[in-house]
Image (cartoon, rainbow, N blue to C red):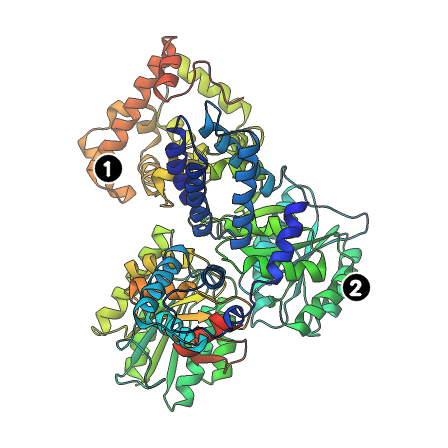
């Protein structure tokens, strides 16, 4: 069982601090230690950043160091951090004023594959909008999964918001239609639509999402104002395919990265952000209703490198 | 399932196959490509590194550089290593002599424990067990309701109570089984993070109180590099017996399965391949390895057809069909029968996925079953007389059939043409050599038979 033992040993060392390895003082270096690069590669790959993006980051880092030179390791750190942050789209799409809306009703639709935490994230979003002083209506368009309605109902109760639901097995578009109608008629500030989890390879289910989008647009031409794709931080390279396929059904406005309270780093969002220019908006860090935070690339990069 | 990995392996294999003689540098170059493929498929970084090193060492030991067919040696080595890494043979679920035999499902949030518990109960029930389910996820809102609904759908009893204490519920469920002659208890537990000390202690306690015959670790097949950390942590605490790989009906991955196997050395026992409750399949490591290498899964397909035959196809029907073939009396009623037989074997996509090469052409896209359903609808809208005497279907009848089946006259025309084509094919059958000609056209050897 040689292979297994070696692997077990190897895993223990995975997340040592990358900067420990180069703590000696250096004078105006214009290249980077191979050990450092190997270590960096390992950290990025084992955080699900992916081969291509990792190679790109390392190449950029090498080029910048050639020009800018560095004297101390903290300067190299700063350059590296900066490179990593660049992967995240800046400006457009970033959350500047969290939980503030400028349209009424402000329609948010939440989508993603099965089990990523859509319903939980919706509960937390509703809670936050409610706390910001808005009236919130939730549409329970996951009519497929057993007891999805009951789960959402619990979250609606916890956040003190209203909910529109039909029985299990009914047409999700009908739920969406009713929710938007009621949102307009009763003057709700924020309308959040929950959808059933679906694998992006199911043509029919992806078609259903496009239909939901059309149903919304028919009633409110500028809606949905926010289309959030929920990604589980443990997701690997398949996350990229998910983002691509979902955005073919409804153009995405942002990502929600859930379950960051575990050991997974969610590095795949680095790749998605840099290749598809979709901002990460929120992160989920626990099962409590206030465990939703606005994404901050600074601390994300920090966590990626230093744990 | 593993389409991406297969098609990429194919490409590098072609590259190395073309080399008559290789240097160590060529092997390195090739293995770098293999490494990239495996990383893209979410195989763990460390596992990949070890795998590539092992393959290189073994290839060099076999004197690959001086051999006449270096490509073959490298490829054979990779295949053998991959099969070894996946675990060499299929492993079944264990049952204990206790009544009930307890099976405990554990894993992260959202990995698919509850759905899989339902699927497993249905699977065991269809194989002569008398299972019950215990709803021990007292944390996630409506988790208990979800399991109850699933239980109703498959007609399996679900034990739950309001005690909010998973250990109490599980122990009461054991008593419930004893009183109600249930031989197997599937315990659905809450999803938990491996670093949540309190929750991990709870599941350890469940284990020590229940003494389960089997603990199954459920993992989402889309999981990335973290799969090994979580699996290792759960394994250290619970020493689980097997792995369940869920959501394999998505596209292109599977690396997690490989990594977990390599790190904790426990077999994958089942895979989940869809949202319906019968979307559960045993895991065959050797077949999966050959699938990764692009050789398809003909064996599964043949088995699926074979297992279906005894219960689903009755002998009388076959005899009747043969009779009709002989007398050239194949009509629309038989056509409909045939369609329904095909449908019983599963969705077209899952059937196609088992044919070598098709995975790559399809690239994870689903085949639409709609045309099949349309044909069915058209035939269902025919009168019995029309079904046995298709020649009487004139323009007016076609119009009526189109209206009745919600299709267009063109659709009806197409179905009728397909039917006549099929009749013609049966005529060719009867001329003797026809069968072998047709097999050759399909790329199969003459005298090929499913049995």
The image quadrant that residue B113 belongs to is bottom right
Taking the spot 52% from the left edge, 47% from the top edge, the residue there is B279
In the picture, the quarter occupied by the C terminus of chain A is bottom right
Tell if the residue under mark 2 belongs to the same chain as the one under mark 1: yes
Task: Give B424 or B171, whichever is nearer the viewer.
Answer: B171
**Residue B356 circle label:** none
**Residue B411 circle label:** 1
The image quadrant that residue A190 belongs to is bottom left
Most extreme residue toward the front is A27
Where's residue B174, x and y in %?
77, 60
In the picture, the quarter occupied by the N terminus of chain A is top right
* Lateral position of residue A165 relative to residue B287, left or right: left
State whether residue B393 is above or below residue A224. above
State whether residue A45 is above or below residue B290. below
Task: Give B84 or B147, whichever is nearer the viewer.
Answer: B84
The crowd level at tag 2 (other Cα within 10 Å; few <14, some 14-19, many 20+) is few
- Give the labeled residue for mark 2: B209
Q: Chain of mark 2?
A: B
In this rendering, the label closer to the viewer, 2 or 1: 2
Q: How many marks?
A: 2
User: Which label's residue is closer to the chain start, 2 or 1?
Assistant: 2
Task: Give B411 or B389, whichever is nearer the viewer.
Answer: B411
* Lateral position of residue A88 relative to residue B239, left or right: left
State whether residue A83 is above or below residue B323. below
């Amino acid at each position: 069982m040689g292979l297994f033992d070696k692997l077990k040993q190897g895993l223990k060392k995975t997340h040592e601090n990358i900067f420990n390895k180069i703590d000696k003082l250096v004078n105006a270096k214009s290249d980077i230690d191979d050990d450092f690069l190997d270590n960096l590669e390992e950290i990025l790959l084992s955080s699900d950043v992916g081969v291509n993006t990792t190679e790109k980051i390392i190449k950029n880092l090498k080029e910048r160091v050639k020009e800018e030179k560095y004297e101390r390791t903290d300067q190299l750190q700063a350059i590296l951090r900066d490179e990593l942050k660049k992967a995240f789209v800046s400006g457009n799409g970033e959350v500047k004023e969290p939980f503030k809306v400028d349209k009424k009703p402000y329609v948010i639709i939440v989508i993603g594959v099965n089990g990523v935490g859509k319903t939980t994230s919706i509960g937390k979003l509703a809670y936050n909008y409610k706390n910001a002083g808005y009236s919130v209506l939730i549409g329970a368009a996951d009519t497929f999964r057993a007891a999805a309605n009951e789960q959402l109902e619990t979250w609606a109760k916890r956040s003190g918001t209203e909910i529109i639901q039909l029985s299990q097995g009914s047409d999700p578009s009908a739920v969406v239609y009713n929710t938007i109608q009621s949102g307009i008629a009763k003057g709700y500030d924020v309308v959040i639509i929950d959808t059933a989890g679906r694998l992006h390879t199911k043509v029919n289910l992806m078609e259903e999402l496009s239909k939901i989008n059309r149903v919304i647009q028919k009633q409110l031409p500028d809606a949905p104002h926010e289309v959030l794709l929920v990604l589980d931080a443990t997701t690997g390279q398949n996350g990229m395919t998910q983002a691509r396929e979902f955005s073919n059904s409804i153009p995405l406005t942002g990502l929600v990265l859930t379950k960051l309270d575990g050991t997974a780093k969610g590095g795949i969002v680095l790749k998605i952000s840099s290749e598809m220019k979709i901002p990460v908006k929120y992160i989920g860090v626990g099962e409590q209703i206030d465990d939703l935070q606005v994404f901050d690339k600074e601390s994300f990069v920090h966590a990626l490198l230093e744990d | 399932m593993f389409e991406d990995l297969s098609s990429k392996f194919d490409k590098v294999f072609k590259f190395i196959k073309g080399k008559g003689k290789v240097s160590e540098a060529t092997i390195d170059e090739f293995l770098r490509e293999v490494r990239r493929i495996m990383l893209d498929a979410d195989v763990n970084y460390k596992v990949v590194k070890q795998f590539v090193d092992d393959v290189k060492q073994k290839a060099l030991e076999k004197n690959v550089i001086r051999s006449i067919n270096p490509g073959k040696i490298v490829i054979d080595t990779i295949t053998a290593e991959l099969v070894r890494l996946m675990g060499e043979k299929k492993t079944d679920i264990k049952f204990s002599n206790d009544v009930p035999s307890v099976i405990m499902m554990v894993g992260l949030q959202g990995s698919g424990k509850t759905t899989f518990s339902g699927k497993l109960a249905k699977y065991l029930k269809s194989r002569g067990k008398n299972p019950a389910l215990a709803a021990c996820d007292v944390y996630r809102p409506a988790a208990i309701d979800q399991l109850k609904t699933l239980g109703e759908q498959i007609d399996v009893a679900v034990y739950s109570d309001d005690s909010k204490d998973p250990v109490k519920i599980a122990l009461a469920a054991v008593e419930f089984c004893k009183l109600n002659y249930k031989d197997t208890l599937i315990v659905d537990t809450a999803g938990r993070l491996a670093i949540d000390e309190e929750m991990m202690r709870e599941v350890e306690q469940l284990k020590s109180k229940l003494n389960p015959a089997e603990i199954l670790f459920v993992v989402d097949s889309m999981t990335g590099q973290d799969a090994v950390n979580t699996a290792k942590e759960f394994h250290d605490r619970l020493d689980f017996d097997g792995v369940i790989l869920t959501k394999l009906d998505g596209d292109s991955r599977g690396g997690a399965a490989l990594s977990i196997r390599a790190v904790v050395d426990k077999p994958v026992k089942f895979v989940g391949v869809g949202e319906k409750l019968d979307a559960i399949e045993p895991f065959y490591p050797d077949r999966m390895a050959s699938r990764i290498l692009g050789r398809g899964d003909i064996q599964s397909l043949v088995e699926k057809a074979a297992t279906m035959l005894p219960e689903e196809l009755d002998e009388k029907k076959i005899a009747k069909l043969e009779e009709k073939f002989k007398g050239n009396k194949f009509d629309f009623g038989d056509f409909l029968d045939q369609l329904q037989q095909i449908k019983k074997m599963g969705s077209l996509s899952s059937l196609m996925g088992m044919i070598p090469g098709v995975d790559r052409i399809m690239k994870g896209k689903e085949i639409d079953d709609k045309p099949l359903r349309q044909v069915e609808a058209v035939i269902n809208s025919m009168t019995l007389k029309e079904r046995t005497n298709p020649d009487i279907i004139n323009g007016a009848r076609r119009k009526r059939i189109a209206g009745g089946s919600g299709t267009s006259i063109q659709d009806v025309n197409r179905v009728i043409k397909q039917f006549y084509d099929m009749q013609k094919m049966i005529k060719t059958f009867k001329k003797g050599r026809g069968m072998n000609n047709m097999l050759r056209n399909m790329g199969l050897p003459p005298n090929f038979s499913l049995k």
